[in-house]
């Protein structure tokens, strides 16, 4: 019974993770980067790179120089069976997030025992940023988390059992993570250096053993094969220009982002508005209940867990110095420090929650190891106190999640997550014979998705307007679109542009060539705020 209770508790935490995620799922509209993988499903011709495979022909393998098509391959059968909807987009990602929580529990249990693993898993399952980046996987980060937790579990099993199959599995998931998104190399590099520092004899033993070395190399090569093939064919294009480094002011801002990710507040103001632009339409009794609970809790924006996780990162090696957990604790701390250092000094990276969250759940693993040391060496009262701290932080996490829900209901999602995308597509579907020109970032993929790839679109319209001033080819494409009477041009309303002044530049470009503009419609969100403007240009 004692063995079964922690397992049952961990499964309940996974179920809780999914349940909370489902509550958030319907509110925001699909976001552009959340849908980026859609190109690999419905527009494979725009992929960065292809592989020629027997009987399958040309298969897209790299969507961008650093982003593979693994997510597209996972989702293709989902969309084929159940079509395009918020549920088919987000439920698989949410389930994968729950799988990562389960794998985390299994790993932490092997290293620190069931009690510490369950306590840390409770923190992870209620972590606001971890949960919300799983539901709304715009990083993308969910497959990264699965690859990291699966790889860690396999490597722990290898360390404890010495079987080559676990080394192969760990290396395979490491390679798979790199193919999914090359930013996995941050964490992988941190662990690589850490392993050399902490386990030099074991590394040497594996290198001298042909069977083990072969398993490690074969596993990684198989997992990362499309990524390696692409870079071998293109002269390692993934790494071109990545030697640029940020200055100290940018590094400081990235430290602030990491802090806000740790305390759960990092998505307020980005995923949800901080203040309402109007009352929500059709408020349900359930939503009124959520707002009432959030009001009683005082709308906390920050969780207590940030301090616990930072202290655990430093304390875990010290608390476990005389135990068998010393090396794993030192390794994880080194890996986190080196991974974040790469993130911090790389230009145009690490400044967003979806980058910082790639370090998860390593902080929580250190919390489990620190708790395990206390449970092992301290008295019962100290153990109860530690469990109380973990429980308090989990409750604090839940309170922060309630604040997000209250903001989602009362204020609504931010512009790039607007629920007006669904209404926009409904309007376009009611205009037979018309085509859509998505002038700004954050419109094209949403129309493709909610329109089920049936609405005629200009291929890469979201960059043409910005390039039209200095790029003759872009100017010609924009002129051709203006000359087509079927085109409806979609922008955000004035002041909401994602690419600065896109709306003004489009209108100025058209008027300079003798076109007159007519506002066909304004598309509002649930709160009555006009988000999209649909234009028609005639001579």
Image (cartoon, grey):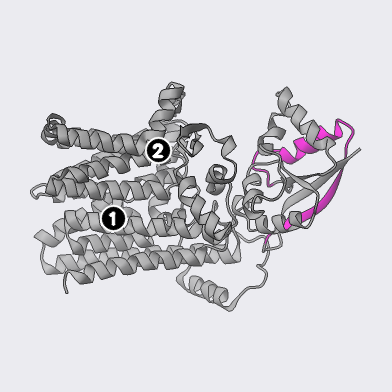
* Percent of width and height locating residue 211: 16, 35
- Rendered location of residue 355, percent (x, y): 43, 43
Q: Is residue 366 visible?
A: yes
At horizontal 80% and vertical 54% (from top left) the residue drawn is: 431
Secondary structure category for the residue under label 2: helix
Looking at this rendering, what residue extends furthest in the top direction?
A: 235
Instruction: State left or right for residue 182 relative to residue 491.
Output: left
Residue 504 shown in magenta: yes
Say which mark, if any, is on residue 169.
Answer: none
Q: Is residue 329 visible?
A: no
Magenta segment: 496-525
Number of residues whose C-alpha sits closer than 10 Å to that of mark 1, classed few (under 14), some (14–19) or many (20 or more)? many
Question: Looking at the image, is mark 1 or mark 2 earlier in the sequence?
Answer: 1
Considering depth in this image, is 101 or 264 the residue closer to the camera? Answer: 101
Q: Is residue 317 left or right of residue 519?
A: left
For this orientation, the residue located farthest to the right is 539
Q: Which residue is mark 2?
A: 179
The residue sitting at the bottom extreme is: 285
| Quadrant assignment for the C terminus | top right
Left or right, residue 526 beside residue 203:
right
Q: Residue at x 77, y 27 (%)?
A: 476
Nearer to the camera, 442 or 369 = 442
Q: Where does the image place residue 532, in percent across and percent down from the top left?
A: 72, 51
Residue identifier under label 1:
104
Relative to 68, does residue 122 appear above or below in the rendering?
Answer: below
What element does badge 1 sit on?
helix
Number of numbered labels in the structure image: 2
Q: Is disc 2 surrounded by few (<14), some (14 to 19) or many (20+) residues within 10 Å?
A: many
- Whether residue 291 is in magenta: the answer is no
């Amino acid at each position: 019974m004692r063995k079964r209770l922690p397992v049952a508790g961990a499964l309940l935490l996974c179920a809780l993770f999914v349940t909370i995620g489902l509550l958030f799922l319907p509110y925001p509209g699909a976001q552009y980067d959340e849908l980026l993988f859609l190109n690999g499903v419905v527009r494979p011709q725009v992929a960065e790179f292809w592989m020629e495979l027997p009987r399958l022909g040309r298969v897209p393998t790299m969507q961008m120089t650093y982003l593979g098509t693994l997510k597209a391959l996972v989702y293709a059968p989902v969309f084929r069976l159940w079509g395009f909807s918020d549920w088919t987009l987000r439920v698989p990602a949410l389930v994968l997030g729950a799988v990562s929580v389960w794998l985390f529990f299994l790993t932490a249990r092997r290293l620190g025992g069931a009690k510490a693993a369950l306590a840390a898993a409770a923190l992870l399952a209620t972590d606001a940023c971890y949960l919300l980046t799983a539901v709304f996987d715009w990083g993308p980060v969910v497959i990264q988390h699965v690859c990291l937790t699966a790889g860690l579990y396999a490597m722990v099993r290898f360390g404890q059992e010495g079987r080559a199959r676990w080394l192969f599995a760990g290396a395979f998931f490491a390679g798979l993570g790199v193919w999914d998104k090359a930013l996995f190399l941050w964490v992988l590099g941190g662990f690589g250096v850490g392993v050399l520092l902490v386990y030099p004899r074991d590394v040497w033993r594996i290198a001298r053993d042909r069977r083990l070395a072969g398993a490690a190399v074969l596993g990684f090569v198989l997992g990362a094969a499309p990524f390696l093939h692409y870079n071998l064919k293109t002269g390692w294009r993934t790494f071109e220009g990545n030697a640029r480094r940020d200055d100290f002011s940018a590094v400081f801002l990235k430290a602030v982002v990491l802090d806000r990710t740790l305390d759960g507040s990092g998505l307020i103001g980005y995923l949800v508005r901080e203040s309402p632009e109007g009352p929500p339409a059709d408020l349900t009794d359930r939503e009124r209940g959520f707002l009432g609970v959030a009001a009683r809790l005082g709308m906390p924006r920050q969780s207590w867990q940030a301090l616990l996780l930072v202290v655990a990162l430093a304390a875990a090696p010290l608390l476990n110095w005389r135990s068998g957990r010393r090396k794993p604790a030192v390794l994880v701390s080194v890996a986190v420090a080196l991974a974040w250092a790469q993130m911090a000094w790389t230009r145009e990276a690490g400044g967003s929650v979806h980058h910082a969250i790639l370090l998860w759940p390593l902080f929580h693993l250190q919390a489990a190891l620190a708790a395990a040391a206390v449970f092992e060496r301290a008295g019962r009262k100290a153990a109860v106190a530690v469990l109380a701290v973990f429980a308090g932080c989990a409750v604090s996490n839940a309170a922060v999640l309630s604040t997000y829900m209250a903001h989602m209901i009362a204020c609504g999602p931010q512009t790039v997550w607007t629920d007006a995308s669904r209404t926009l597509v409904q309007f376009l579907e009611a205009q037979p014979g018309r085509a859509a020109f998505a002038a700004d970032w954050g419109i094209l993929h949403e129309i493709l998705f909610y329109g089920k790839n049936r609405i005629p679109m200009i291929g890469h319209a979201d960059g043409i307007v910005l390039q039209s001033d200095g790029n003759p080819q872009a100017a010609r494409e924009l002129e051709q679109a203006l000359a087509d009477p079927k085109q409806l041009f979609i922008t955000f309303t004035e002041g909401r542009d994602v690419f600065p002044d896109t709306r003004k530049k489009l209108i100025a470009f058209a008027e300079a060539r003798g076109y007159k503009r007519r506002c066909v419609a304004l598309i509002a969100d649930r709160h009555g705020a006009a988000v999209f403007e649909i234009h028609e240009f005639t001579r």
